[in-house]
Amino acid sequence: MKIDNPAPWGRPQPITETLHSNSDWRFDRPSWDAAKCIRCGFCYLVCPDSAIAQTADGDFDANLDYCKGCGLCVQQCPTGCITLAAAGNRPPWMAKA
């Protein structure tokens, strides 16, 4: 069955795309070790901002315009190939213990 009129909103978009970039207040950013990644897609599934996408070669990467640095991808990765690196100065009241 062909759908003549697709949904009026088009493709699913990250919620932050309609607002603004998260890059000005993100304190941590994810990075992948491609050698350890098994391309399971758990990071893609748990990202609350749809910031993670699969690249043409099958790897996953985060769009840092939409990534909040929440760390859910790091917690769910079965191989531990994702790490969070500091991306900015964290205010004293948000210091990691």
Image: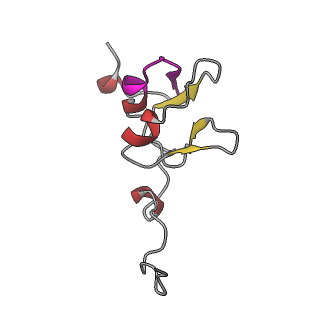
| Quarter holding residue 78 | top left
Residue at horizontal 37%, vertical 26%? 76
Magenta stretch containing residue 17, yes or no? no
Q: Is residue 47 left or right of residue 82?
A: left
In the picture shown, does residue 4 fall above or below 80? below
In the picture shown, does residue 51 fall above or below 18? above
In this rendered view, identify the residue nearer to me: 80 or 22.
Answer: 80
| Quarter holding residue 58 | top right
Quick one: quadrant of the C terminus? top left
Residue at far bottom of view: 4
Residue at horizontal 48%, vertical 28%? 89
Q: Position of residue 9 (x, y in %)?
A: 43, 75
- Tell me the magenta residue range: 74-87
Residue at far top of view: 97
Q: Is residue 66 left or right of residue 48?
A: right
Q: Position of residue 19 (x, y in %)?
A: 42, 62
Q: Is residue 59 left or right of residue 67?
A: right
Residue at horizontal 47%, vertical 42%? 67
| Quarter holding residue 70 | top left
Residue at horizontal 49%, vertical 67%? 11
Residue 87 visible in the snapshot = no
Q: Position of residue 14 (x, y in %)?
A: 44, 56
The image's colouring method is secondary structure
Q: Position of residue 77 (x, y in %)?
A: 43, 24
